[in-house]
Amino acid sequence: MTPTRTRNPFTPGSGKSPPYLAGRENEQNRLRQILANMAAGESPAADMVMFGPRGMGKTVLLSWLENEAKKASTKDNSIRTSWTTPNKLTSPTDLWSYLLSQDWKKRLKPNQWIAKFALLSATWESRSAANQALVSTLTNECKKSPLIFLMDEAHTMDAGLCRSLLNLSQEIRRNEAPFLLVFAGTPGLQYFLSTVNASFVERSDKIGIGRLDAQSTADAIVKPLNEHGIEIDDSTLAPVVEDSQHYPYFIQLWGAALWGVAKEEELQKLTYQEVTAAKTKVESVRLDFYGERKDKLDDLGLLPAAIAIAKVFQDAETTTRDVLKKVIADNLPVDSLTTQSVNEHLRTFIRHDFIWKPPQIDLYEAGIPSLMTYILD
């Protein structure tokens, strides 16, 4: 029996769902509990902030949440989901087209719909902390049908729009209507939200999306291969797992390359020889990926500090904020060395995923350890 000749199941790309979503059980269980409560008519206690370096699978988890909401819906309480990105919100009307249900629009005549939207848009533009026209409209909608509003790439939002949306979410939940606002973005999302002057945002439910563990990495590769009649033993798989750095994007690169080699050779079992051939394909893509990241840091004048930070992570998996600030300060020109400039450079490294700090710990780790190795090399 040769491997099934279908399209490659692995998805090394932007936001595509992998053939097997591994290593996110804790996050999935937390989200399932929230969905169950919403299906029972309960309002979530807080907004959700989902953040992590690019390529970790945040958008994939949003897709999973959207699909899971359909499963959690009951006959009497259907959970509605709406998903958008900041670039699609060019006006208040755009936003309300995502927030309000089709049923709400159908209940109004065309001229009433236009007038109602004009009112909502005007009140939204006022950016008031708790505008009653907006709150009452969406509160009533959510009590009829719970709503999960998913905002991907939230770190690129307009600050005023973000603040108004956060205030709106707080008021709706205060009225005990089941509404969940989910922001997903890069590690810079945390800092961005701290600048919008919504005092309660620090109490959001935070989920850090980082690298997988070794077993989950192996499962993400092996299970889809097995489903296509392709086997790989543990000893052959081990260097693949290690080389992937447990980074979801690289895991999918490896899976796609292994599946491609097996298909080309019509193999049922992969050996060290096929892993070597697949690695050549992985490296060609990965070097472009690394090069683009390095060039960006160079364009920002951050390469000397990036090299120094990479040296820190050669000897440790995590480090403190103070250590990072000292390393950055040591690599800034004396005439531009201020506390403010050091903090801004640190935030820039975080915004560009070079380093990040997962929730619940006060230590920083590398966004992608192998990127640091590449920069040092």
Image (cartoon, grey):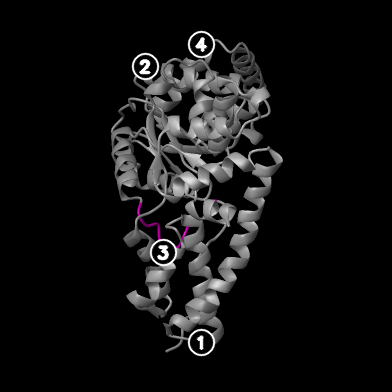
CA gap, disc 1 and disc 3: 26 Å
Label 4 vs 3, first from the N-terminus: 4
Q: How far apart are marks 1 and 2 (CA)?
A: 59 Å
User: How much space separates mark 4 and mark 3, taking CA atoms?
Assistant: 49 Å
Q: Which mark is residue 129?
A: 4
Which range is magenta?
15-23
The residue singled out by tag 2 in the image is: 174
Q: Is residue 262 above or below residue 23?
A: below
Residues packed near mark 4 inside 10 Å, few (<14), some (14 to 19) or many (20 plus)? some
| Amino acid at pointer 3 | Glu
Q: Tell me where residue 5 appears, x and y as whole percent.
A: 52, 80
- Magenta stretch containing residue 197, yes or no? no
User: Residue at label 1?
Assistant: 266
Q: Residue 302 at what x, y percent from top left?
A: 63, 39
**Which residue type does callout 2 highlight?**
Arg
Q: Which residue has dot 3 on it?
A: 242
Residue under the point 42% across and 46% down: 210
Q: Is mark 4 on a helix, strand or loop?
A: loop
- Closer to viewer: mark 2 or mark 3: 3
On the question of residue 100 being in view, the answer is no
Q: Nearer the viewer, residue 213 or 13?
A: 213
**Distance from Cα at disc 4 to Cα at disc 1:** 62 Å
**Residue located at (62% from left, 42% from top):** 304
